[in-house]
Amino acid sequence: MNISAAQAKLFYIIGFLLVLNSNAQSLGGYDLWLGYSKIEDPAILSEYQKHTKSIFFDNHSPVLDTARKELMRGIGRLLGQPPIMHDSLSLLNTMWVSKKMNLGKDMVSALEADFERIGSEGFIIKSVTVNNKSILLITANEDLGILYGVFNLLQLMKMHKSLEGINIVDAPKIQLRMLNHWDNLDRTVERGYAGFSLWNWQKLPEYKDPRYVDYARANASIGINATVLTNVNANALVLTSAYLEKVAALAEVFRPYGIKVYLTARFSAPIEIGGLNTADPLNKDVIEWWKERAELIYKVIPDFGGFLVKANSEGQPGPQNYGRSHVDGANMLANALRPFNGIVIWRAFVYSEEDATDRAKQAFKEFVPYDGKFLDNVLVQVKNGPIDFQPREPFHPMFGTMPNTPLVMEFQITQEYLGFSSHLVFLPKLFEEVLDAETYRKGKNATVAKVIDGSLFNKKISGMAGVANIGNDLNWTGHPFAQGNWYGYGRLAWNPYLSSETVAEEWLRLTYSNNSEFVEAVKKIMIISREAVVNYMTPLGLHHLMDTGHHYGPGPWVSDLSRPEWNPTYYHKADKEGIGFDRTPSGSNATSQYASEIAKIFNYPETCPEEYLLWFHHLPWDYKLKNGAILWDAIALKYQEGVYGVEEMIRIWEQARTYISVDQFNEVRMLLEIQLKEAKWWRNACLLYFQTFSGRELPPGVELPDENLEFYQSLKFPYAPGN
Amino acid sequence: MNISAAQAKLFYIIGFLLVLNSNAQSLGGYDLWLGYSKIEDPAILSEYQKHTKSIFFDNHSPVLDTARKELMRGIGRLLGQPPIMHDSLSLLNTMWVSKKMNLGKDMVSALEADFERIGSEGFIIKSVTVNNKSILLITANEDLGILYGVFNLLQLMKMHKSLEGINIVDAPKIQLRMLNHWDNLDRTVERGYAGFSLWNWQKLPEYKDPRYVDYARANASIGINATVLTNVNANALVLTSAYLEKVAALAEVFRPYGIKVYLTARFSAPIEIGGLNTADPLNKDVIEWWKERAELIYKVIPDFGGFLVKANSEGQPGPQNYGRSHVDGANMLANALRPFNGIVIWRAFVYSEEDATDRAKQAFKEFVPYDGKFLDNVLVQVKNGPIDFQPREPFHPMFGTMPNTPLVMEFQITQEYLGFSSHLVFLPKLFEEVLDAETYRKGKNATVAKVIDGSLFNKKISGMAGVANIGNDLNWTGHPFAQGNWYGYGRLAWNPYLSSETVAEEWLRLTYSNNSEFVEAVKKIMIISREAVVNYMTPLGLHHLMDTGHHYGPGPWVSDLSRPEWNPTYYHKADKEGIGFDRTPSGSNATSQYASEIAKIFNYPETCPEEYLLWFHHLPWDYKLKNGAILWDAIALKYQEGVYGVEEMIRIWEQARTYISVDQFNEVRMLLEIQLKEAKWWRNACLLYFQTFSGRELPPGVELPDENLEFYQSLKFPYAPGN
């Protein structure tokens, strides 16, 4: 081959890349934040070319092989030219990718402190000098660190960050960074709004859909290392041999990406698939059955992660059916998994149909007394707030009150109560608010984040779970910006101290454009989006106002469901006198579950933050807020503010038009139209309904509803997704 | 760069291309047969460059705008450079795309005969000489013809056909080329095996998923011009205003691609959504309700196609509920649609739970007497065979027996009884067999195709319907080769005289590669695949042997369903004496529904084609076939032949390895593994079961089952898709 042929070839490659690029667009977001197009800025390009001219890649395992492929793909596309990779070290190498064990002694000792900080999953990206030559080094203690380091490097390059003098020493602060899929075996997804389940059980184990690889790549790129494949409302069949083979096939696909699979264990499985007549956790046959089942599972999936269990909650079977406790149930399963290093994650989301206590108090009441009684391979998974993934809740009072039990944070990435995948709501803003919350359980600065990452009580194991918003829609998450919630969840699971603004900026740059005007404008949309949804759905501490079943639109009037705590009226308690749930000592006294420093703030309407006002207080319609407005007017104006927020988002989005493709622009524009329509619907329906109690006019500045209350009450959505 | 560096470079470039290629593949077939990559052959490239150097495109409508965009995209990618398009004619133009009305008089008169042949949807692609210059002309009478012509040109180019002296004058032979989606409003798809429904009703009308455009493109590229969006087991809600707005949004997306939308009309809609207490087609209020509903529909969808109706079949409501006939029902709806030029397509797939007649005879019996009584905007849609989409059925005896009624052919593209989307079965082979069948209803050469295209009885309107195999899987159809069934269906709806082999070759070249070794080898897989599935499921005229509900695996033993004709035992009638359904005059006399020329062949086992033998005859186990084998041995050997067929397909597929990407290869390879496993399952289960009657050993050459009959009978598939 002569030079000009090589050049011709290169030209051809560039043309090919252009074709791919425009193709990528017709894919409607399938690439997530992992699309690579050639860097056009000549200065950046030349810097990166210099660093990646000759890469030594030390490659001896499936995970490292993944890292190598990612590096080749990423650099090849970003630079428009495949990188030259070497399996053995040479003086020409400008970049080294190598585990600690294969580095020279001098290098290791120079980096010793860094290696100690990064543990088994962290990485170092560092500009080092060897023989007077500057080398870009990616290193780690273990294979997975290398993979994470490679993804990190590629993300830096996609964001056009300089690599000169780079010195990144990073490691996850939380060990289990999990997705919880609420996917059923029939491929419906409970609270799934992005199509249906990715897991094609029918064609597994033989057919491993190439999409499973892309799912694993996306997760690994943000550090997610665990996935629970099945719904917490579990089906025992997944524990049968036929299904375990299918699970094993998925585990095999995910393994080279450092992701372990978990399953939900239906507590009554010994009856349903084991032929026993009890699932009593203290029954010998039951204990034996689970032990054998664990053996069977680990035989086909040697690195199986463990079980996630929803027991004695919303009709799911559990140990209480046999007069046993959560501890009895969890420890029995933990014993079965222990020989294989498996864990049990036991959900604290419980409320009883017999218990008349304020639902917000029940989980605390049931679990806190058991602190210290769970085996050490049991974790308790707690939702971020004490009710159920509302647009805003105060942090769950269990955080900080079980010093001897590792608590897993359960966030919901899927927008069950936040407009499904039709509404643009940037959830890391919500996650951040919870993680930053002060528990005062070990003095000041005892934030929820410190409970979760194990640092507050020095835990050996820590975890965060996100209920996945992923389905088989072409773009994975239905709304393009819902990809940002998946991304942001992963980033906060890696580092719960990151600011949501940082995460928003990263995601925008990786997904759309590095243009700073675009990023600044659209970041603003993301940052304001969460407060907008709070305002147009449930302002000032209102909660659980949604319609029955689908949890989509407003239904504050619903009061006829069999269990009182399923009714919105249970939560807002609106009457002629006022509105709100009294959770102070004069009411349910839920505030007593918080540290006294917090309780005393929540207990008085004057000190209670206004965003939680009606969560903790029942107040008269003419109660005066800090700004002088009476409560009724304030509620109405907050709803209006929510609508204005969406209008503002639409205005800002117009500015994005010139920076992205027509399709990218239009897709979000159409969805914002739905969001605006529905923000108005929430406002109108809620205000018309609450007005029947307040008996007051809407204050100036609030748009008049264009339909009457009966209209909103008549709306039906028999085929809303996610049920 | 020295030579060895260049060589190293080449090595990595190749590696890189493979990576790139495998990524294109990670799109997993989303592009269907419409992917364009740059043509590398310099001779072909230069020929195409010459023809497309300067394109005059006469562009004045939404459909023409679509055609223009397709032409630009296709040529741009095939030639690696966007073509130069001109809105006004110049001497420089090498290619003209223009409707007849905008061509010069001389040109029109020279092409007059061609224009007459192509009607409103056909096109002309012709090399013409103007001012001594050779021009590539695409012309048509109407806009849609231009769009079809553009797609045709691009397909020719993708297949590297020379355009020198080209002279194509083509037009569809069938007017309504329809897809029937059996999609439910909850996005499940009855008999859908490629994920779930594309129609995201929840986000419509505001959000028009970009995928809808890609769906329309794919259909337009093969000439499909009509789509029924909803399941024949219909839900009246789709006829309410809220849903009609959503339907209108889809219609708006499809319109520029020449595709009209249709809906299924639930006969009891006047009760369910109209508040009436009857749906009697002769009732004044019912008549009025449908008229008003039609007005409402056409107000929001001015070019709405019409209704597809399944009435009085399998529990669906219909006119017989009120003592009225199919004619009463169909004509009432036809009157409602007539003012808007809408049509009614009334399905003939009926069998009654009270009628003890052989199910194969019932549709004929119910419909043939009504010939000539339907209004002229009514078509009757008849499945290809008299039972229900079995791997093989003789053609439906209604074809040719209703000279005064337009009969629409209903094929099933989705593989309800042919291995779902796990099995590679090339259905055009089946379609061709039916279309080529002789009805003898107007002498010789009165084929089914001639009934369908209207030429036999000189019909004004003609149609073909295909039950869609499309879902929201990334590759649309689950199995990559099932894309070929969608493609092939479209091609045969355009021209029912095409050979399945031609269609297979086109699809392979458009989808995978023009390499002739690849095409010849893989075409063979496609061609043998249909006989293989017949053999491993239902050889020698056996039929309806599948298990209950899911219709997936074998269940020849099923005999306990409430309706006799739902049981496989009803169809195979195996006993100690023999096996098969006697449909001759000594039995149900279904043969009498065929022309006497055919009946006399079917009536005798000696003359009956062996592929229909047990469809028409109950024969003893030791009945001697033409090849001398006794029936039992022949059945067993046919099952074995089916398994061998799949093994042969796997062997041939190995040859494809070098011509396509690793992912493309593996995907099909994994699916063939499922197919082989299940071919053996069918063989083993059926033979073990029939053996309980025949009492004979398996003949030499048939592999022994590795499980016993009880095992196969015990298999359950609670979450099989498509129910």
Image (cartoon, coloured by chain):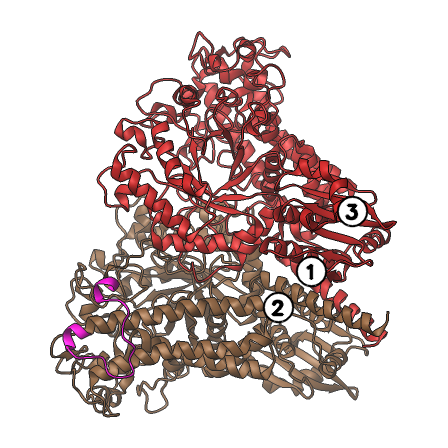
Chain colours: A red, B brown
Distance from Cα at disc 1 to Cα at disc 2: 12 Å
Q: Which of the marked residues, 1 or 3, is nearer the chain's N terminus? A: 1
The residue indicated by pointer 2 is B35
Q: Nearer the viewer, mark 1 or mark 3?
A: 3
Against B38, residue A577 (above or below) is above
Chain of the residue that carries numbered disc 1 in the rendered image: A
Q: Residues within 10 Å of mark 1 (few under 14, many from 20)?
A: few
- Kindly identify which residue carries mark 1: A22
Identified by mark 1, the residue type is Ser
Q: Left or right of B429: which side holds A699?
A: right
Magenta stretch: dominant secondary structure:
loop
Q: Amino acid at mark 3?
A: His
* Circle 2: residue type: Gly
Q: Specify the segment rendered in magenta.
A: B691-712
Of A637 and A272, the residue lying toward us: A272
Secondary structure beneath dot 1 equals helix
Mark number for residue A160?
Answer: 3
